[in-house]
């Protein structure tokens, strides 16, 4: 019994005494032990810590475009790119100069066209019809007769024109003369036509009450090379004793013609 009690005391007391007598670890040993502890011992990170990390990451991403833009501008205006930049501005300047030149040429062209129009207006050409004459003696016993009509086409302007044709309108068919000849200033070209008369007109010719209306058209090319058309109308009144001539003055105005 005593032996068992002694062994029990040795087993219980000796370990306690050994723990009290064992030396405490130094600061370096404690730091080494803490360093060597596995990561699993660390306490889990709190939810707030994750939020802070995300905010820092967002802040870094926001700063990147500024750094990239600065880097792009620095590369754009690098010394090796200066010749290309100079060529770009030179091309833009050339385009601007070309546009300004085209506008100036357009204004000059318009000025020349206006000047030509003014010259054409001031130096407009026309013709006069002068020295009208009717010859012929229809037979009193003929149902139909004819008269020979002559007049001069005069150029009253100071420039040469090209007389193309002279035409008179007739119910039986228009009569056309095509001299196609130059007509100098103050010069004339004779136009001759034959006018057919009806039986009634033949009788009125011998009664000196014949009233003829001659209408026609004259075409010429003016000194500027433009083709011009001039319509004319004349009234021939008389008969076997002679005729009187006057220009037709009952032309419709522009407003009446439009109606």
Image: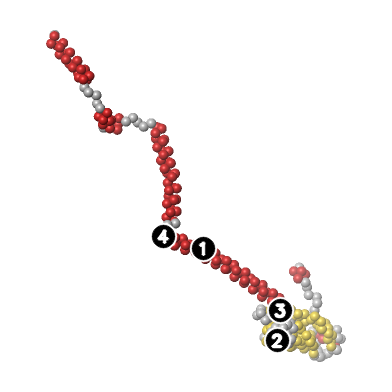
User: Which numbered disc, 4 or 1, marks the residue closer to the eye?
Assistant: 4
User: Which numbered disc, 2 or 4, marks the residue closer to the eye?
Assistant: 4
Label 2: element kind: loop
Badge 3 density bin: few <14, some 14–19, many ≥20, Cα 10 Å: some
The quadrant where residue 217 appears = bottom right
Q: Earlier in the sequence, mark 1 or mark 2?
A: 1
Q: Which mark is residue 92?
A: 1
Front residue of this view, candidates 256 and 116: 116
> CA gap, disc 4 to disc 1?
20 Å
Q: Is residue 145 above or below residue 12?
A: below
User: Which numbered disc, 3 or 4, marks the residue closer to the eye?
Assistant: 4
> CA gap, disc 2 to disc 3?
15 Å
Q: Which residue is mark 3?
A: 123
Seen at 42% across and 59% down, the residue is: 79
Label 1: element kind: helix
Q: Which residue is mark 4?
A: 80
């Amino acid at each position: 019994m005593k032996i068992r009690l002694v062994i029990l005391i040795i087993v219980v007391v000796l370990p306690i005494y050994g723990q009290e007598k064992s030396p405490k670890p130094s600061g370096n040993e404690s730091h080494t032990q803490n360093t060597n502890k596995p990561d699993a011992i660390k306490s889990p990170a709190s939810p707030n810590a994750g939020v802070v990390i995300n905010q820092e990451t967002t802040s870094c991403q926001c700063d990147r475009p500024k750094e990239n833009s600065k880097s792009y501008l620095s590369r754009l205006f690098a010394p090796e790119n200066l010749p290309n930049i100079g060529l770009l501005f030179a091309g833009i300047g050339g385009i601007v100069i070309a546009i300004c030149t085209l506008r100036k040429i357009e204004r000059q062209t318009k000025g020349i066209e206006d000047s030509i129009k003014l010259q054409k207006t001031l130096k407009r050409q026309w013709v006069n019809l002068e020295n009208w004459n009717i010859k012929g003696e229809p037979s009193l016993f003929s149902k139909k007769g004819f008269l020979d009509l002559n007049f001069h086409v005069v150029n009253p302007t100071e420039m040469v024109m090209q007389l193309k044709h002279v035409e008179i309108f007739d119910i039986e068919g228009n009569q056309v003369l095509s001299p196609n000849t130059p007509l100098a200033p103050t010069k004339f070209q004779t136009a001759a036509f034959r006018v057919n008369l009806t039986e009634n007109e033949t009788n009125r010719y011998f009664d000196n009450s014949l009233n003829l209306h001659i209408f026609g058209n004259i075409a010429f090319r003016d000194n500027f090379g433009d083709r011009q058309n001039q319509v004319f109308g004349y009234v021939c009144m008389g008969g076997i004793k002679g005729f009187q001539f006057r220009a037709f003055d009952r032309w419709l105005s522009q407003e009446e013609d439009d109606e």
